[in-house]
């Protein structure tokens, strides 16, 4: 849900339900990398409420578009990390094959 004014689209607060610090901090980090962002931050209204509020203020671009771009950038970063991890696991399995285990209770 977006909270903002009808006249100034360069700043808004977005409420994300069923989310916590994990996503909010990653989105905040990604937003801070964007030169169009003048301020971004997040808050969690109450610990028992699974909701985060992300505040975005820009240099003039619509805050909604800047947040959308940041989420797309974050998805690309996650795909890259996942791909890199999968490749490293595959390489490890090739260079370190599983050895046969000798399980003998008499020794």
Image (tube, grey):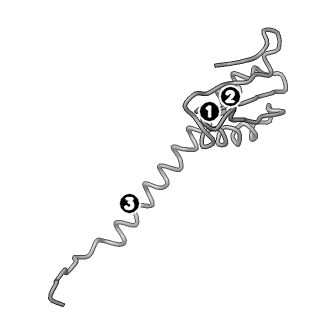
Say if mark 2 contacts mark 1, CB within 8 Å.
yes
Q: Residue 19: horizontal and vertical position, in percent?
A: 57, 34
Q: Earlier in the sequence, mark 1 or mark 3?
A: 1
Q: CA distance from mark 1 to mark 3?
A: 29 Å
When the figure is inspected, residue 54 is found, relative to residue 74, above or below; the finding is above
Instruction: Indicate which disc residue 59 carries.
Output: none
Instruction: Say left or right for 75 vs 88.
Output: right
Q: Residues within 10 Å of mark 3 (few under 14, many from 20)?
A: few
Residue pointed to by mark 2: 67
Q: Residue at x 69, y 40 (%)?
A: 30
Residue pointed to by mark 3: 90
Observer-nearest residue: 10 or 87? 10
Q: Residue 77: horizontal and vertical position, in percent?
A: 58, 44
Query: Splitting the image into 4 quarters, where does residue 74 fall?
Result: top right
Quarter containing the N terminus: top right
Between circles 3 and 2, the one closer to the viewer is: 2
Say if mark 1 contacts mark 3, CB within 8 Å.
no
Q: CA distance from mark 2 to mark 1?
A: 6 Å
Instruction: Say left or right for 58 vs 20.
Output: right
Instruction: Say left or right for 105 vs 78.
Output: left
């Amino acid at each position: 849900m977006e909270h903002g004014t009808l006249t100034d689209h360069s700043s808004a607060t977005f409420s994300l339900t069923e989310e916590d610090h994990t996503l909010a901090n990653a989105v905040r980090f990604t937003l801070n990398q964007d030169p169009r962002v003048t301020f971004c931050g997040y808050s969690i209204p109450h610990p028992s409420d699974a909701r985060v509020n992300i505040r975005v203020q820009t240099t003039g671009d619509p805050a909604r578009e800047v947040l959308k771009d940041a989420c797309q950038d974050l998805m690309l970063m996650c795909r890259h990390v996942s791909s890199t991890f999968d490749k490293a696991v595959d390489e490890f399995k090739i260079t370190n094959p599983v050895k046969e285990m000798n399980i003998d209770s008499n020794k």
